[in-house]
Structures are given as structure tokens and as C-alpha cells.
Image: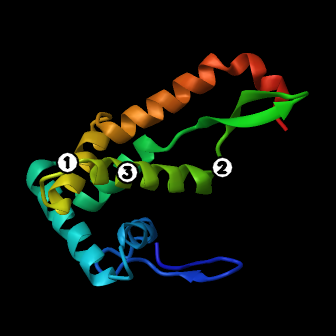
Amino acid sequence: MGRITSSRTQLKGDPKFDSILASKFINCLMWDGKKTTAQTVFYNALEEISKRVKDAEPIEVFTQAIENIKPQIEVRSKRVGGASYQVPMQVSRTRQQSLAIRWVLAAIRDKKGRPTHLKLADEIVAAYNKEGAAMTKRENTHRMAEANKAFAHFAW
């Protein structure tokens, strides 16, 4: 894994697993610049996952969960002659990852009344099993694209 060089920055993996995906997730989870708190929440969630899923490493469960949530296709608005159409389009790899992370975080932030690391563990295990709120969001996105494939010829 290690480092990947980008045109803008050099990305480093997280301190515990050296995973770039985990590092990105922690950065998105972070609130008000409190990275240590975000790391604590993430690692506590992974500990909880290791208790629930016995047959796999928690970081592998997390990676597979994100992989399961990634959308292949989405709809985008396109104006043609005064009318707006929902045009289905392929999703780039970087956008797939950012959408998956965003949907997981939205799902855990919508739930109230429990510690964040438990909500995160619930959502990751659910996504690993192809269930949960983030998976529902992905299915709805795919369903919308399927319903609007008549407008695919407007794709740019």
C-alpha cells in the first residue's frame, strides 16, 4: 500500500493500518479539525467490527464495505432546449469512493442516540453484508439511472 503520489499532494496511509482509504475516511469523518478524535472513533469502530465479524480482518471488512457501496452509475441533470433531463452516466473511480464515504457518513450522522463508533461499526458491517442505509442509497441511485436510461443519448 504505502504512498501514492498525486499531482497535488502526497497521500499517506493511516498510522495503524497504512491504508490510504482509511486515511481518507478519517479525514472525512473529522469535525472541526479534531483528527485524533476522528481516529479514535474509527479505530474503536474497527475493534467493534472485529468482535462481530470473526472470519476477516476489520480493515478488510471496512474496505469491502466501501467497495460494496460504490455506485457504478448515477444520474446527472442536463438541460436540453429548456427541459431538464436526468441523464445516467458512468461514475469515475475517485467519485465512486467519495460518494461511498459520503453516504456512510450521512447514514451514521442521521442516526441519533448512540456513540458514533457503534453507529459506524453497525453501518460498516451492514454494508459488508450488502445491507444498511448506505447500500439503500446506492440501490436507489442505480434504480434511478435504470429508470432514466431512455435519456442516455443526452450524455456528454
Q: Is residue 121 above or below residue 80?
A: below
List the single residue furthest toward the front: 82
Are dots 3 and 2 in contact, CB under 8 Å?
no
Given this view, does label 1 or label 3 mark the residue nearer the observer? 3
Q: Position of residue 100 (x, y in %)?
A: 46, 49
Type of amino acid under label 2: Ser
Between discs 1 and 2, the one toward the N terminus: 2
Local crowd size for mark 3, using a 10 Å CA cut-off: few (<14), some (14–19), many (≥20) = few
Residue shown at the point (43%, 36%) measured from the top left: 137
Q: Residue at x 37, y 51 (%)?
A: 106
> What's under tag 3, amino acid-wise?
Ala
Image height check: is 28 above or below 130?
Answer: below
Asked if residue 46 is positioned above or below residue 52 in the image, the reply reads below
* Tag 3 secondary structure: helix
Question: Which residue is label 3 attached to?
Answer: 106
**Which percent across, then down, holds residue 72?**
58, 37
Residue positioned 19% across, 51% down in the render:
112
Q: Position of residue 68 (x, y in %)?
A: 41, 41
The residues tagged by marks 3 and 2 sit, at their Cα atoms, a distance apart of 21 Å
Identify the secondary structure beneath mark 1. Answer: helix
C-alpha span from label 1 to label 2: 27 Å
Residue depicted at x 73% and y 30%: 87
**Where does label 1 land, which residue?**
122
Q: In the image as oriented, which residue stretches furthest toward the left? A: 51
Instruction: From the viewer's side, name the closer residue of 93 and 113.
Output: 113
Residue 92: give its label.
2
Determine whether, in the image, residue 13 is placed left or right of residue 142. left
